[in-house]
Image (spheres, coloured by chain):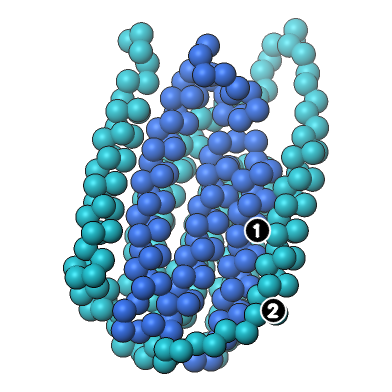
Chain colours: A blue, B cyan
């Protein structure tokens, strides 16, 4: 377990976070943006776990990552329900075309 | 040996992420996200977080990804139609791609600069190879009891809210 320096984890997580950011900016689809947000949350979790490696008695990093996973699950369910409602009302999933609250 | 495995799974994760970024079809993107989640779970194992890797696979791959694929398939829309009087629209969404690339590359450059110039002094000793399940269970039930209960209530609220939002999709029916 000692072979891999922490900078490697941080670099991989930074690359993954930036890919997720670019995805959530680039995609013209609500669910594409959700995919990007999931990748960003995973990158943050890699950072937390990599630093939590040096805390074997209390494991605060891993516990924080566990709570992040729970909140991500809740976020995805509510976001998908909202996307389905928006699709049922506007018949589109392009965030540029959904620009009013009432129709 | 561990370093080689680390490189392989990092390359798998990043390649899957880039594939999502570049692919047009969101279904392919969702399946590439499956690969990315598996790669992240492998990185957890290499960092000594075995319980977290298993929960990553169960929650993300078994729950969130299936939900996302359902969402993609329920919101598919036919772009092509046989109606010859319909205008052909040529969409050139180039500014969004430019800004996405600029934001991603700029943030990545900044983060790499910060990480490479940092010098972490780790005070705790390195994790041994024993399982983390016992420690996580004890910590969740003692010092992290309040966040645990709040997470339970959050999941309940999300369940009720999502069911309410998704149930009456058609107000006229």
Name the mark on residue A18. 1
- In the rendered image, the quadrant that contains the N terminus of chain B is bottom right
Q: Position of residue B162 (x, y in %)?
A: 33, 34
Q: Position of residue A40 (x, y in %)?
A: 55, 56
Which quadrant of the structure image shows residue B135? bottom left
**Residue B131 relative to residue B11: left or right:** left
**Residue A31 relative to residue B119: left or right:** left
Q: Position of residue B85 (x, y in %)?
A: 75, 7
- In the rendered image, the quadrant that contains the C terminus of chain B is top left
- Same subunit under labels 2 and 1? no
Q: Give the SS element for disc 2.
A: helix
Task: Kindly identify the residue that appears in the image at 42 percent across and 89 percent down.
Answer: B124
Measured Cα–Cα span from mark 2 to mark 1: 17 Å
Task: Kindly identify the residue that appears in the image at 68 percent across and 43 percent down.
Answer: A26
Q: Give the SS element for disc 1.
A: helix
Name the mark on residue B31. none
Task: Kindly identify the residue that appears in the image at 31 percent across and 34 percent down.
Answer: B161
Q: Is B59 or B149 nearer to us in this picture?
A: B149
Using the image, determine if residue B22 lies above or below residue A93. Answer: below
In the rendered image, is residue B12 in sight?
Answer: no
Using the image, determine if residue B37 lies above or below residue B83. Answer: below
Q: Is B149 or A13 nearer to us in this picture?
A: B149
Q: Chain of mark 1?
A: A
Which quadrant of the structure image shows residue B118? bottom right
Q: Chain of mark 2?
A: B
Q: Position of residue B55 (x, y in %)?
A: 34, 64
Task: Kindly identify the residue that appears in the image at 73 percent across and 11 percent down.
Answer: B86
Using the image, determine if residue B91 lies above or below residue A10. Answer: above
Please name which of the two marks, 2 or 1, marks the residue nearer to the observer.
Answer: 2
CB atoms at circles 2 and 1 under 8 Å apart?
no
Q: Is B20 or A10 nearer to us in this picture?
A: A10
Residue carrying label 2: B116
């Amino acid at each position: 377990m000692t072979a891999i320096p922490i900078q490697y984890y941080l670099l991989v997580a930074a690359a993954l976070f930036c890919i997720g950011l670019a995805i959530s900016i680039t995609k013209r689809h609500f669910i594409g943006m959700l995919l990007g947000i999931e990748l960003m949350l995973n990158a943050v979790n890699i950072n937390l776990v990599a630093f939590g490696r040096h805390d074997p008695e209390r494991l605060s990093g891993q516990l924080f990552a566990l709570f992040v996973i729970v909140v991500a699950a809740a976020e995805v369910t509510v976001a998908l329900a909202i996307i389905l409602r928006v699709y049922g009302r506007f018949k589109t999933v392009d965030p540029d075309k959904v620009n009013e609250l009432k129709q | 040996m561990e370093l080689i495995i680390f490189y392989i799974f990092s390359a798998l994760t990043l390649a899957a992420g880039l594939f999502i970024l570049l692919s047009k079809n969101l279904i392919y993107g969702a399946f590439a996200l499956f690969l990315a989640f598996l790669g992240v779970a492998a990185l957890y194992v290499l960092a000594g977080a075995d319980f977290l890797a298993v929960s990553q696979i169960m929650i993300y791959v078994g729950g969130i990804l299936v939900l996302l694929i359902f969402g993609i398939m329920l919101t598919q829309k036919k772009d092509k139609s046989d109606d010859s009087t319909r205008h052909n629209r040529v969409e050139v969404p180039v500014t969004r791609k430019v800004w996405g690339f600029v934001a991603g590359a700029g943030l990545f450059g900044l983060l790499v600069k910060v990480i490479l110039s940092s010098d972490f002094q780790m005070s705790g000793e390195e994790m041994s190879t024993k399982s983390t399940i016992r420690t996580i269970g004890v910590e969740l039930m003692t010092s992290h009891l309040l966040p645990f209960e709040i997470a339970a209530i959050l999941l309940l609220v999300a369940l009720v809210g999502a069911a309410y939002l998704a149930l009456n999709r058609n107000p006229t029916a």
